[in-house]
Image (tube, rainbow, N blue to C red):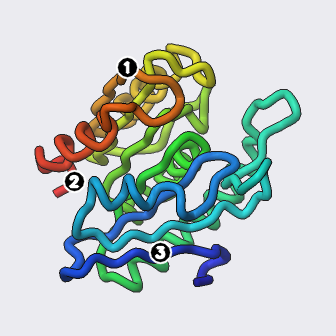
Amino acid sequence: MESAGFHYKLDIPAEVPDCAVVLLHGSGRTEEDLIPFGRAVFPRGALYAPRGTVAWEAGFAFFRRRPDRQLDSDDLRHRAGGLCRFVTFVFEQTGQRPLLVGYSNGAIIAAEALCQNRHLSKGAILLRPLSPRNDALLPNLTGYPVLLLAGAHDDRRHPCDAPHLAGQLASAGAEVVLETIDTGHGWAEDAMDERLSRQWLARGSTA
């Protein structure tokens, strides 16, 4: 399927959906990548999984990095604007503000998108995140719920990256929960990412 500048996969449950979710994959991956995670966490969710628009390694990414692996901030901001249009499309299709779920590259652009317009979505789960605006104050995010899931042995992140983003979000007024899991950059073998996400949702964090 195609809309708002993205090729995307739509996964609908057998029952009437109880929420809408936008799934944002990591670098070098595709729109299929987060569907199993999304279905495990949101068994009755309408899952919208866009494909990143940047060809990257054997798959795709949502924004470019510079040759030294630093974020290309201009490209990130531009492409996050496009993601906001896709999130608006999801709202128009479902009548619900979706949750944003991003992993790695997808978590970074999700964080930038919520900074650009926090009113388009009702909450975010950011796995292995990194701040999209490292040295800047974030806009007003009062009451916006965010779950950050960091890996204790993540060789692609500095140990301070997730706490730094958590601090930025909290300073902007967001309701932040940061969990550090005994894993690396990839998925925890004990499905802890799924369990912590379900627990966070069960507490009514995005009601």
Instruction: Assign a secondary structure to mark 3.
Output: helix
Q: Earlier in the sequence, mark 1 or mark 3?
A: 3
* Crowding at mark 3 (Cα within 10 Å: few <14, some 14-19, many 20+): some
Instruction: Assign a secondary structure to mark 1.
Output: loop
* Crowding at mark 1 (Cα within 10 Å: few <14, some 14-19, many 20+): some
> Badges 1 and 2: C-beta atoms under 8 Å apart?
no
Q: Percent position (x, y) of residue 22?
A: 44, 63
Q: Which residue is mark 3?
A: 88
Q: Which residue is mark 1?
A: 182
Q: Is residue 50 above or below residue 184?
A: below
Q: Is residue 8 above or below residue 120?
A: below
Instruction: Assign a secondary structure to mark 2.
Output: loop
User: Which residue type does callout 1 highlight?
Assistant: Asp
User: Which residue type does callout 3 highlight?
Assistant: Thr
In this rendering, which labeled residue sits more in front, label 1 or label 3? Answer: 1
Q: Quadrant of residue 7?
A: bottom right
Q: Which residue is mark 2?
A: 206
Left or right: 58 with respect to 43?
right
Q: Earlier in the sequence, mark 1 or mark 2?
A: 1
Quarter of the N terminus within the rendering: bottom right
Separation of disc 1 and disc 3 at Cα?
A: 35 Å
**Front position in the image: 137 or 98:** 98
Left or right: 193 with respect to 56?
left
Q: Is residue 167 above or below residue 30?
A: above
